[in-house]
Image (cartoon, rainbow, N blue to C red):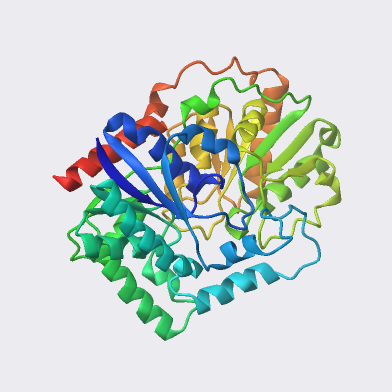
């Protein structure tokens, strides 16, 4: 069996979608002839922890190193809880102190604050390569520093390297808020990274197209491997029971995933139908950043609740118990955005109200599924109309679920095992 060194800053027991992607790759790669050896960081101060994920990768070789980045330093401070507490933020300016701190770190650390992990990771990575007889290096970003670590190891050991881009990423994205020096450095950095990689994968075609267009002379091979869902995660899950028409949103809220259009539509619906607040419940699962949720309209406030980040299986209990799933992307979202959550939404086979712009890659995926209703964020009246129609269909019994049995044919492409086989095939192509 061939061995792959997996460089991933975010890895279990941390949670969130980026962790799910690389963790599921590691879970299934041995079935396709590749043994992962993981290089990651020691415990960090992070808002999403899910120790249950470690149960899926028992026996996996994981090497955890020190780092001097802020998240690692924070975790080592005496008396510091390693998981920030969830709270509904109130009375703060549009740019919170946290976002200001993030902005300052981006100005000070290049290409990101995780560059302070690099010396520890490179040293440990070198030892792993020599002791484990590694055949290929695989790095996943963000953080971009993971790719720099892989680049240095590849350069020294002359091993093939595959770089994974989980988010929309472009050197031009760096320009608006940074100095000319930052921009020049970032362009030089990105070109050297792309020139060094033997293979590049990304979660959507627009990301690949952007990287390719900005680096026309690259000899790297490209492949789109989307996010997905793991059918095994749905086994033995007992859906939560709700008495009202329950709308669930799972994931972080931020300016790119703002619930404002939905709130406005719900407020209109309640004003036109005063009896509905007693029949409709909306639950948001996850954290929120740089977005003020403390001043909800009075007519909808009692129908909306917020639940902090949950372990993955618990969040699935909510999804499977929901009557309607809510998906949010703001108009300013980058074209390459395809969040991992949409695939788990689809796997539930529940109705989905997707409030998203026309230009995002996620729309090209969801329009293939009849249970998804897509509405642009600016059309509040249409959102309200669709909500009303969906509630009426639910009230008539149209949405009552019969339960999950098998992976639907049109979803098999996005099953984690299938996606991992695609990755293993790409690895094989790279080393041949």
Give the residue at the far front of this rendering: 131
Snapshot quadrant of residue 292: bottom right
Figure check: 367 above or below 4: above
Give the residue at the far bottom of this rendering: 180
Q: Is residue 304 left or right of residue 343?
A: right
Q: Quadrant of the C terminus?
A: top left
Give the residue at the far left of this rendering: 432
Q: Is residue 4 left or right of residue 242?
A: left
Q: Residue at x 63, y 60 (%)?
A: 75
Figure check: 261 above or below 276: below
Q: x, y (%) of residue 400?
A: 65, 18
Figure check: 403 above or below 356: above
Q: Residue at x 72, y 31 (%)?
A: 246
Specify whether residue 154 is in view.
Answer: yes
Taking depth in this image into account, of 393 and 194 the one nearest to the observer is 194
Snapshot quadrant of residue 144: bottom left
Q: Residue at x 53, y 38 (%)?
A: 54
Q: Is residue 304 left or right of residue 195?
A: right
Q: x, y (%) of residue 254?
A: 62, 57
Q: x, y (%) of residue 22?
A: 42, 44
Taking depth in this image into account, of 194 and 375 the one nearest to the observer is 194
Taking depth in this image into account, of 231 and 206 the one nearest to the observer is 231
Specify whether residue 359 is in view.
Answer: no
Q: Quadrant of the N terminus?
A: top left
Q: Is residue 62 left or right of residue 33?
A: right
Q: x, y (%) of residue 302?
A: 85, 42
Number of numbered callouts drawn: 0
Q: Residue at x 62, y 49 (%)?
A: 48
Taking depth in this image into account, of 261 and 184 the one nearest to the observer is 184
């Amino acid at each position: 069996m061939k061995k792959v060194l997996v460089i991933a800053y975010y890895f279990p027991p941390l949670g969130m979608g980026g962790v799910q992607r690389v963790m599921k790759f590691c879970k299934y790669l041995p079935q396709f002839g590749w043994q992962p050896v993981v290089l990651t960081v020691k415990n960090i101060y992070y808002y999403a922890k899910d120790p249950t994920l470690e149960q899926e990768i028992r026996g996996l070789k994981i090497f955890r190193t020190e780092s001097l980045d802020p998240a690692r330093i924070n975790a080592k401070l005496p008396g510091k809880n390693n998981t920030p507490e969830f709270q509904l933020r109130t009375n703060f300016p549009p740019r919170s102190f946290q976002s200001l701190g993030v902005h300052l770190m981006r100005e000070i650390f290049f290409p990101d604050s995780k560059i302070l992990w690099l010396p520890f990771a490179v040293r440990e990575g070198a030892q792993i390569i020599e002791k484990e007889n590694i055949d290929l290096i695989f790095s996943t970003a963000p953080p971009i520093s993971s790719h720099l670590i892989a680049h240095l190891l590849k350069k020294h050991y002359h091993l093939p390297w595959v770089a994974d881009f989980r988010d929309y990423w472009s050197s031009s994205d760096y320009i608006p808020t940074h100095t000319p020096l930052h921009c020049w450095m970032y362009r030089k950095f990105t070109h050297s990274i792309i020139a060094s990689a033997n293979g590049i994968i990304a979660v959507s075609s627009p990301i690949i197209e952007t990287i390719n267009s900005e680096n026309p002379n690259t000899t790297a091979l490209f492949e789109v491997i989307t996010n997905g869902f793991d059918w095994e995660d749905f086994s033995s899950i007992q859906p939560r029971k709700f008495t009202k028409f329950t709308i669930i949103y799972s994931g972080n809220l931020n300016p790119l995933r703002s619930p404002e259009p939905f709130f406005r539509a719900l407020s209109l619906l309640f004003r036109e139908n005063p009896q509905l607040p007693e029949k409709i419940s909306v639950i948001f699962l996850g954290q929120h950043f740089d977005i003020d949720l403390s001043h909800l309209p009075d007519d909808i406030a009692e129908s909306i609740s917020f639940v902090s980040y949950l372990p993955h299986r618990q969040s699935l209990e909510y999804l499977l118990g929901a009557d309607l799933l809510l998906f949010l992307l703001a108009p300013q979202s980058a074209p390459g955005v395809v969040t991992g959550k949409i695939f788990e939404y689809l796997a539930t086979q529940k109705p989905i109200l997707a409030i998203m712009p026309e230009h995002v890659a996620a729309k090209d995926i969801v329009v293939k599924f009849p249970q998804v209703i897509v509405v642009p964020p600016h059309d509040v009246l249409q959102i309200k109309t669709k909500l009303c129609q969906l509630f009426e269909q639910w009230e008539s019994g149209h949405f009552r679920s019969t339960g999950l049995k098998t992976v639907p044919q049109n979803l098999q492409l996005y099953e984690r095992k299938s996606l991992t086989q695609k990755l293993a095939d790409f690895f094989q192509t790279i080393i041949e």
